[in-house]
Amino acid sequence: MSTQLLNITNLQKTLNSAKSTFTLGTLSFDINQGEIIALVGLNGAGKTTLLKSIMGLITLNSGEIIFNNDISNFNRNKIGYFPETFSGVKTNLKVEYFLQIIAKLNNISDNNVDITIRDVLEKVNNWEHRKKHFNQLSKGMKTRIGIAQALLSDSSLLILDEPTDGLDPKGKREIKELLTKLKYENKTILFSSHNLQEVETICDRVIIIDNGKILINDTINNIQNKNNNLNSLENFFFNIINKDE
């Protein structure tokens, strides 16, 4: 029997700007332990808003988010998080010093900091760049460091906003392999992506979101079995989006 790790019930948020109003919700879904779930949608569909809402970076209008059966205000530090804006971080710290700060925020003991940092950097194949200053890194390298800092929490849940953005084909393949490996270590991963081929090859379930509402929440296998006339998730995605329009 699957263990529910994250429960989202009737989540709703309205964002107002001088030019427009965007409403997310009302959204409800669960995430089970050990799943890899992709959040898919066009630009502006609400993917990042949803992930930020889960992380408590945006105050909800209404709804409830329960992590690991913690009904109260759970500690978001227990979730590994990679924001889409990570590559825009401005600091001249060396990579290893930057990660030491993140490690302390994650309450990693001084005795374990160095070995833990080495472990996460090796997982993203970036150990050799530990002495470089953050501002000297390419966007792809910053993405790797961003994933590494998310892994420092050793959380059962990882929330990753575009974790392969800025990576070359080799880097994309390596991160896909890492996510698959983490699943077999019983990690649960919710990530957003525009790469539907990537989603199709590594995900258990896909959530398609458009204009702030969920259109599809189903397993890859079910989508393939129910839509055998569509030979790819990409075709299915655009068929669903066009229907909604």
Image (cartoon, grey):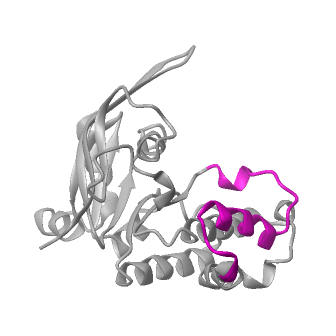
Residue 200, given in percent of the width and then of the height, sits at 34, 70
Residue 82 placement (x, y as % from top left): 56, 58
Looking at the image, how many numbered discs can be counted on the residues?
0
Q: In the rendering, at what x and y percent does residue 68 appear?
A: 30, 59
Considering the image in quadrants, where does the N terminus appear? bottom left
Query: Residue placed at 81% from the left, 66% from the top?
Result: 137
Can residue 212 be seen from the camera position used here? yes
Q: Nearer the viewer, residue 89 or 3?
A: 3
The quarter of the displayed image where residue 198 is located: bottom left
Height in image: 171 above or below 101?
Answer: below
Work out which quarter of the rendered image holds the C terminus and state it: top left
- Tell me the residue at 68%/82% (across/down): 111
Query: Relative to 44, is 130 above or below?
Result: below
User: Residue at image x 11%, y 63%?
Assistant: 226
Q: Nearer the viewer, residue 216 or 240?
A: 216
Quadrant of residue 203 in the image?
A: bottom left
The answer to whether residue 152 is above or below residue 180 is: above
Question: Is residue 200 one of those drawn in magenta?
Answer: no
- Can I make out residue 228 in this image? no
Could you tell whether 45 is left or right of 82 in the image? left
Q: Bounds of the magenta span?
A: 85-111
Does 89 appear in magenta? yes
The residue furthest top is 18
x and y percent of residue 70 in the render?
30, 52
Q: Quadrant of residue 147?
A: bottom right
The residue that appears at 54% across and 63% down in the rendered structure is 163
